[in-house]
Amino acid sequence: MVGIPELDPARSAEIRNGIAFLLTDTQIRHRNGGYAIFGRLVYKVTDRAGLESGARLDIEFDPSRERLSFNRLMIIRDGVVIDKLGDAKFEIFRRETDSERGIFDGRLTAHVDLSDVRVGDIVDYSTTYDVTPTVAKDLLYTRFQAEWGEPVALTRERIIWPTEKPLNIRAVRTGLKPRVTQSGGETSYLWETANPAPVKPQDNLPVDYPNFGFAEISSEFDWQPVVDAVLPFYQPTESFPADFEAKLAEIEARHGAREDRLIAALRLVQDEIRYVSLSMGAGSYVPRHPEAVLASGFGDCKDKALLLVSALRRLGIEAEAALTDIDEGRALEHAVPGLQAFDHVIVKAKIGERVWWLDATDYLQGGRAANIVPPDYGFALPLVASGAAIEKLPVKELLEPTQSVAERFAFPRRDGEPLVLTVNTIYRNADADRMRRRLAHASKAKLADDYIQYYSRQYPGIKSTAMLETADDRDLNVLTTKEAYELPSEALLANDLAKNFPLRADIGIGGMPAPTAVGRTGPIALGSPVYKSHKVTVTNLKSQFSPPERPDVENPHFSLKLRGSPLPTGLELEWSFRTLEERVPAEAISAYLQAVADSDRKSEWYYDFTYADTAAASSDDVSTLSIDFLRAIRTAVLLLP
């Protein structure tokens, strides 16, 4: 048993929430059919803020494959050990924190409130998990953080494994290496760190550049054993209930081309089987039989993937399930083999030499075989009998904007008439899929209310004059919306709105990550590709207005362009915004953040549309000034011809 170490006094100012961590000690030991995990945590309650959390223990476990035991539970007060294990009253809860998302994992929580915990007490407890995996019984995968965000006196991670089965160890953003010893046919790997410097978390990091360095360990050096552990459960069925077989027969009769059959089968599974995940026990990795899924009308990613694979095979299309990770899939390329590296299942389908990656849970997805958007998960592992390997998922090239907004402002021709605004928006590809699902969840009235709130912030007093109109071409994957508004004459004249009229582009610049550069060492993840446009046309003005000068922002990582042209009695502006890279390296962050701020300014311009001369009245030559500053000097500088 490791003695309790002292925390470096120099770290005392970094203690948070009234808890000082003194020891974290984890040991994993192989046994036939599984392994045991010993864990020990020792911490000190340093002030009043730590009493609640310091006196409460919540330990989760999966009863289908883990047996949890408490080995010790004690308080050390002024050097005196007080045993709390004997009189501790444990309660077992099933919380299902993801039930609202349709996910049920069956995990339980062992809860205990320690009595008579005081400031200055040291709490020392240890547990043992006796783990018998429901699948992949002979495989090990684990990972641990090599760094913390707060002080800890000593961290220990130890694995004892048969010498005949060497472990595959990968260190990510850490130089920590294990001390390796051998004895009696077993090899011990020990990682130990005393008083490591706390790491300050950084926002918007790529998934392959984690905040905290870690080590991941696997018993395998190849992906095939991982696939072999679950492949028997993903064998497609060759028979279906009569009603589902009739639907497949109808698809087969209606569509001669296999590409059309693929889309029809995908929509059948996506749209008619609702999402519910029963991930208790083996359900974490093993899909339910397609017949059970069809009878219940629901399934999770595993269930729906197997059902889709079965349906595609029935329709003469080669298909297999593939494992991926929704949030960390882009980091799979370099991961060590392990079933726990995945949290999602998709489908790989093939017709001739053409490959499609399909997500059976992505309901209401649009597009045909030629233009369907592949899932944006980075990498996946197809479940094949031989040659298993991580494969890169394609990223759909954006050849045109996925969101195009066209606003048309018709100023009143006569006093007392309202300004008329019409807005037409075209959504394509993934943006069309998202809007289609949004419309399915929210009423048109709710969406229209969101839109009027948006415009009210810019044009106080604006009113909707027609119901929101939508049109959806699911095959082309193009969805359009149409809005209509009026701004009464008195609202246009109030607070000099017409003299300081904002034209603003809704092109996603506000969604660009802009974390602080102070202390930044990691890159910034820009996410999925973005390509949006926004066109503004203003008519019925009393003068010809010019577009701004020097409105573009060029950066190696994104581009903002503004093209404009004067009309005889109006103005036309069109912004185009697109990202050019997936990430910003650390050395380029300062320039990137400046470009984001510049783009934010240049996505909004103010005009004096009451001007009645033929000279231009635009915001030329002041594009680098902030919007607040422009507002402050608009009558003195900005709006003068």
Image (cartoon, helix red, strand yellow):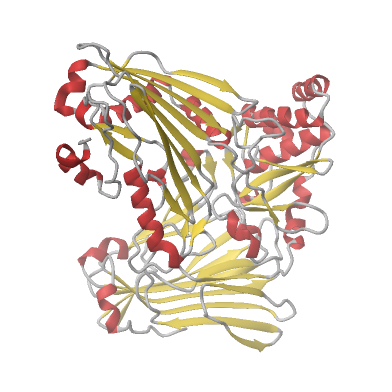
| Left/right of residue 218 with respect to residue 509 in the rendered view | right
* Residue nearest the viewer, comparing 397 with 429: 397
* Residue nearest the viewer, comparing 17 with 162: 17
Q: Residue at x 25, y 48 (%)?
A: 626
Please provide percent x and percent y for residue 204: 43, 57
Please provide percent x and percent y for residue 617: 26, 33
| Left/right of residue 327 with respect to residue 319 in the rendered view | left
The C terminus, quarter of image? top left
* Residue nearest the viewer, comparing 353 with 556: 556
Q: Residue at x 63, y 47 (%)?
A: 395
| Left/right of residue 308 with respect to residue 522 in the rendered view | right
Please provide percent x and percent y for residue 187: 66, 83
Q: Residue at x 45, y 82 (%)?
A: 193
Count the numbered circles shown: 0
Q: Is residue 90 visible?
A: no
On screen, 172 above or below 309?
A: below
Q: Residue at x 27, y 15 (%)?
A: 412
Q: Is residue 30 visible?
A: yes
Please provide percent x and percent y for residue 94: 47, 48
Question: Which of the 4 image quarters holds residue 302?
Answer: top right
